[in-house]
Image: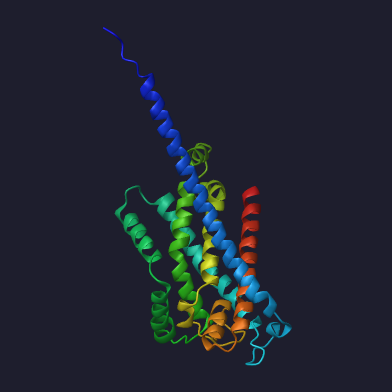
Amino acid sequence: MRPISIAGKRQPVRLHGRVKSRVQRGLVYGAAALTFAVLLFLISYILVRGVPNLKPSLFSWTYSSENVSMVPAIITTVEMTLLALLLAVPFGLFTAIYLNEYAARGNKLVNIIRITTETLSGIPSIVYGLFGMLFFVTYLHWGYSMASGAMTLAIMILPLIMRTAEEALMSVPDSFREASFGLGAGRLRTVFRIVLPSAMPGILSGIILSIGRIVGETAALIFTAGTMAQIPSLLQSGRTLAIHMYVLSGEGLHMNEAYATAVVLLIVVLLMNALSALVAKRLTKK
């Protein structure tokens, strides 16, 4: 009885695998190149249309209909971002710690919280704006103010911070916790001295994403913070850079200034992300 040779069958299989691998690699490279090209086009378009329209009057301290200054909007954007993060980050982080470190595995309440969080992440921002208008602006009588806008944004970014923080905590190996427990450390000490430092890069990545969503938000803030072009106090109305650009383009009288505002908004987002990345890098080294 003659043996059946399979050498001839292996060669087509290997050839098919190589072709498939090259096709997949080409798709990955093509998608990356397309994404980079779109991003480069958008940034170039904003810079080409906006940089020539930058002028000193746009950086006056006070706003008027003649100079349409964006300085109050820049200050309001920074204040709104810091206030929303100050409200959302502690709640989101501590909730993630409870869900991952303290709650029992397979707890039905934990599953309900996770499903609810994922559902809230997909709700359009205008729905949050309507809720903020009905609850903070109308029911609590805060009016159109920084407080109403910051509370609404904090609720909006809370699911994002919770999910990213929880995923970062899950990525920490259990051997770290077991080694800490073996040395006599309690659960609280283990969480704050071992687990959190190891998960800090992932947690800060979620915070950076939240910053980008806050800075670019318009729908939720129009219904809660208003559109007043001033440097507001906590209970006064103010506009962020995104709303400032939206108002200028909506009026149709200051399109050049709107493009200039887009350039400044892009720079502010890059600076905030760079600062957050620097803080993350230093915390990771420590």
Location of the N terminus (image quadrant): top left
Q: Is residue 31 visible?
A: yes
**In this view, which residue lies farthest toward the top?**
1
Compared with residue 103, is residue 248 higher up or lower down, i.e. above or below?
Answer: below
In the image, what residue occupies the spot 49% across and 53% down? 31
**In this view, which residue lies farthest toward the right?**
56
In the image, what residue occupies the spot 49% across and 43% down? 25
In the image, what residue occupies the spot 56% across and 75% down? 80
Compared with residue 129, is residue 172 higher up or lower down, i.e. above or below?
Answer: above
Q: How is the image coloured?
A: rainbow
105 or 15, nearer to the observer: 15
Describe residue 30's horizontal placement relative to residue 16 as left or right: right
**In this view, which residue lies farthest toward the bottom?**
65
Compared with residue 246, is residue 160 higher up or lower down, i.e. above or below?
Answer: above
Describe residue 228's horizontal placement relative to residue 62 as left or right: left
Q: Position of residue 39 (x, y in %)?
A: 56, 62
Q: Position of residue 101 (x, y in %)?
A: 43, 50
In the image, what residue occupies the spot 49% across and 86% down? 144
